[in-house]
Image (cartoon, rainbow, N blue to C red):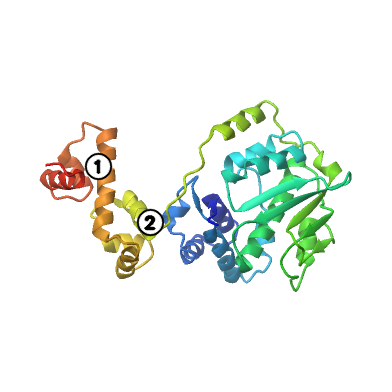
Amino acid sequence: MDTVENVAFSNFVLGNSGLNESARRQLARAAELPDWVLDAGDTMVPSTYQLNLWELVEHELAEPHVALRIGKTNTLGNFGLHDYLFSTAPTLAEGLARSEQHADLITTNIGFAVSGDSEEEANADVRLRNGHGRGRELATQFALAAVVTRARNATGRDVHPVRIRFRQAAPRRYQPFVEMFGTRQVEFGAPTDQITFRTADLELPLATADPALAPILVRCAAALPPPPRLEVTWAGQVHQALKALLGDGRVTIDRVARYLATSSRSLQRRLADEGTTWTRELDRARSAMVEQRFQDTPDVTQAALARRIGYADAGALRRARQRWTGRK
């Protein structure tokens, strides 16, 4: 199953890792997340990138409980509209229900469901639909820690779950889990990843509740199209790089390869593996930019536009447009 997550997850992990900017960029590239992806805003990328990133961050820091630490920094506003749908709800239970209902605003990989198993307790199951190995374990630890931290911040109360369950095998040290969740009832090797809340805690009012804004946000979320999914193929990466670089001096394959933290030879090989070439992708990006510029600024001259996208003169641009459109 192909699943996606908002690039805000990767930015949040890196931003709260404690690593400097240079190290964060290096890890992102090692996870095959180029710079332009991290700057892409409200965009969905394949979940595998975040899972790989967790493993790289843990290895770089030599910190086996890094996901719990970063989950504990989950404050309001990091994940856009999804956060505010939760925070404006009247109670913790309603906030969690809205998080479940609108999870696809930020991820299609994490399933979240709350069920009342008794009058005293309710279980919140967290399911990763895609992923395996250490990356999956760390992503799950982060998800559970982030939910509990969000509950504490929004209620202004030190909410302690009754019990925490993890599918992963027991770690060498589980005291950091006890300290994070505030309960000694932390189970490993369980059939599901789960937080058990006290029913009384779920009825706690949220300090951030906003009865006027909440219904507006719910209607807004219902009307929104799904966030754009980024095409993170090598051809897609080249296209995004060219969008950023065209109009800023002469654009060569060497310059684009440096932008994508690879070599020109490797880039040519990867494009060939995807059935395309550097020349074809340069043509595609130039064509898209030209048509957009003529649409946005119809009075732009062909000579000025030609210079901007790297053609010698207006004649060269005119011949290129004829080639793109098939018209003489």
Of residues 213 and 277, which is closer to you in this image?
277
Q: At which x and y percent is residue 240?
A: 36, 52
Q: Which residue in the protein does label 1 denote?
A: 290
What amino acid is found at the position of numbered circle 1 in the picture? Answer: Val
Q: Report the residue at 38% width, 64% height from top.
A: 261
Residue 142 versus residue 30 in the image, above or below: above
In the displayed structure image, the side of residue 239 where residue 140 appears, left or right? right
In the displayed structure image, the side of residue 192 where residue 24 appears, left or right? left
Q: Residues within 10 Å of mark 1 (few under 14, many from 20)?
A: some
Q: Are marks 1 and 2 in contact (CB under 8 Å)?
A: no
Q: Report the residue at 70% width, 27% height from top.
A: 211
CA separation in Å, label 1 and label 2: 19 Å
In the displayed structure image, the side of residue 305 where residue 47 appears, left or right? right
Q: Quadrant of the C terminus?
A: top left
Q: Which residue in the protein does label 2 denote?
A: 237
Q: At which x and y percent is residue 55?
A: 58, 67
For mark 1, give the secondary structure: helix
Q: Quadrant of the N terminus?
A: bottom right
Residue 247 seen from this side:
no
What amino acid is found at the position of numbered circle 2 in the picture? Answer: Gln
Q: Report the residue at 45% width, 54% height from top.
A: 37
**Residue at the right extreme, as displayed:** 120
Q: At which x and y percent is residue 315?
A: 10, 45
Which image quarter: residue 82?
top right
**Residue at the top extreme, as displayed:** 212
